[in-house]
Image (spheres, rainbow, N blue to C red):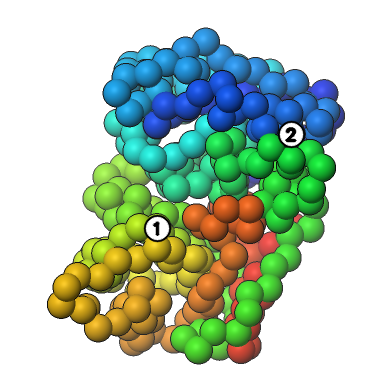
Amino acid sequence: MSRPQYLKEGDRVAIAAPARKITPDELLPAVKLLESWGLEVELPEHLYDSDNQFAGSDKTRAEVLQKLLDDPEVRAIFCARGGYGTVRIIDALDWSRFAQSPKWIVGYSDVTVLHSHIHRNTGIETLHATMAIDIPADATEKPYRSTVSMKQALWGGTMQYRSPAHALNRDGAAEGEIVGGNLSILYSLCGSRSDIDTAGKILFIEDLDEYLYHIDRMMMNMKRSGHLSNLAGLVVGRLSNMHDNAVPFGRTAEEIVREAVEEYDYPVCFDFPAGHIGTDNVAIVMGHRIRLEVDGGGEVLFIP
């Protein structure tokens, strides 16, 4: 995949809200942090629109994002927050100018729609990283793992992480482009033109606030649709705040994932520090070629 240019001081970046609505107070820490990095921050018109839970109508959100995608002076678009809504506008967007002049798309959770669609249709790397609403008020003073790794990725620093040992890990080593994101979103994109291509890739998944049987249903879909059979490796981020029914499902979320890939032989790393985990959510350059080494723990090295 091709890579947008790394950022530098003086670059103009923008904050967009393709899904749930946002307020100025909620964005203030993000604006302060980005400005402290020497970036010029654009807050586009209609950013604070409200249409029930959405940041404005589908038409308005698509128009705002399209304008930012087409603007060659905007070098990165930081998504304000997730929730739900990006899938409602994805087919209204024209990616032709973006493909000619790529820029960083930054976010996670619902932003997985953008990551997957961009990878499948333009072959351009994106950044799975913390969003504006997640940035603490004191982020300019404290080196939070989420914000430090995000800047490191955007400035072209060496990316290398290590996960603690996990009982369900499967040892091995692999190289390939890392793709994926939020499991629920990937599941919802199956069969669409935003569907993820996993053949020969290292798949990353994470999720939040799901019932265990939902996790099982999604993993069965991913398996039956062929998304798990030809992987080079699997990196499982945090599966946070899972729920069970009155009659227990009988397996943890991690056990459900491991069972779904039991018949394959590629390396699997659990408990990778990315996903809905606040300020520990490390940045992942999606679409970038990485080396995955699992030996008790799991080390993920992004290869330049």
Question: Disc 1 marks which amino acid?
Answer: Leu
Numbered label attached to residue 33: 2
Q: CA distance from mark 1 to mark 2?
A: 26 Å
Look at 67% across and 32% down and name the residue there. Answer: 29
Q: Spot the residue most to the left.
A: 247
Instruction: Give the quarter of the image for residue 154.
Output: top right
Decide: is 205 above or below 22.
below
Q: Element at badge 2?
A: helix
Instruction: Give the quarter of the image for residue 257.
Output: bottom left
Question: Disc 2 marks which amino acid?
Answer: Leu
* Residue 204 horizontal/vertical position (percent): 49, 63
Look at 73% across and 52% down and name the residue there. Answer: 144
- Neighbour class for label 1 at 10 Å: few (<14), some, many (≥20)? some
Decide: is 95 above or below 210.
above
Look at 63% across and 41% down and name the residue there. Answer: 135
Dot 1 or dot 2: first in sequence order is: 2
Numbered label attached to residue 208: 1
Relative horizontal placement of residue 83, taking residue 47 as reference (left or right): left
* Residue 125 horizontal/vertical position (percent): 58, 45
* Residue 196 horizontal/vertical position (percent): 38, 53
Decide: is 212 above or below 184.
below
